Amino acid sequence: MKIGELAAATATKVETVRYYEKIGLLASPARSSANYRSYGSEHLARLSFIRRARDLGFSLEVVRELLTLADDRTESCEAVDGIARSHLSEIDRKIADLSALRRELGRVLDSCSCDTIADCKIIDALAPRR
């Protein structure tokens, strides 16, 4: 398949496919007689893996590590489990931070009487401390 077909099949931009090739996440494909990139099922599977990992929030560095681990099917999945647990902890930390942010913004909104800007608690909360 051509690059556009691979991109469409994985909901990936063509530029992103080229970037993944450039940084070595995706192997460079063979070229057709017309010099088009010719991707196979292994490219589709690998790009699908990359896309799913990225959708789950894994960084490109971690995706590279996961791909390396996935390439050796005989190894224990203990390392993969550790990577996933670490990522889950980071997600939990971000959720806690966002929850605290939400509570604070809600508190500021609740304190605003919607009178004039001079009395606006939201503007007061955003202004530099004097």
Image (cartoon, rainbow, N blue to C red):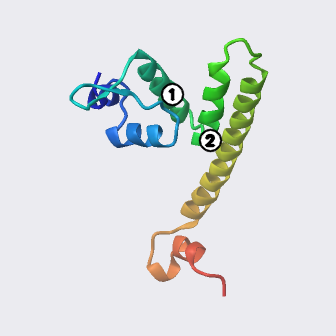
Q: Which is nearer the N-term, disc 1 or disc 2?
A: 1
Do residues under tags 1 and 2 come within 8 Å of each other at their CB atoms?
Answer: no
Residue 111 at x, y = what percent?
58, 65
Look at mark 2 in the image and give the residue it sits on: 61
Q: Residue furthest top?
A: 74
Q: Could you say whether the residue bearing mark 1 is in a helix, strand or loop?
A: helix
Q: Nearer the viewer, residue 57 or 96?
A: 57
Q: Residue furthest front?
A: 33
Residue 51 at x, y = what percent?
47, 31
Q: Quadrant of residue 74?
A: top right
Mark 1 and mark 2: span between their CA atoms? 14 Å
Q: Residue furthest bottom?
A: 130
Q: Quadrant of residue 86?
A: top right
Residue at x 62% of width, y 20% of height: 71
Residue 28 at x, y = what percent?
43, 32
Look at mark 1 in the image and give the residue it sits on: 52
Quarter of the image containing the C terminus?
bottom right
Q: Could you say whether the residue bearing mark 2 is in a helix, strand or loop?
A: helix
Q: Residues within 10 Å of mark 2 (few under 14, many from 20)?
A: few
Vertical side of 109 occupied by 98: above or below: above
Q: Nearer the viewer, residue 115 or 83?
A: 83
Residue at x 67% of width, y 13% of height: 73
Residue at x 67% of width, y 18% of height: 72
The reply to whether residue 49 is in sight is: yes
Residue 2 at x, y = what percent?
28, 26
Q: Nearer the viewer, residue 54 or 123?
A: 54
- Horizontally, residue 79 falls left or right of residue 123, namely right
Residue type pointed to by label 1: Arg
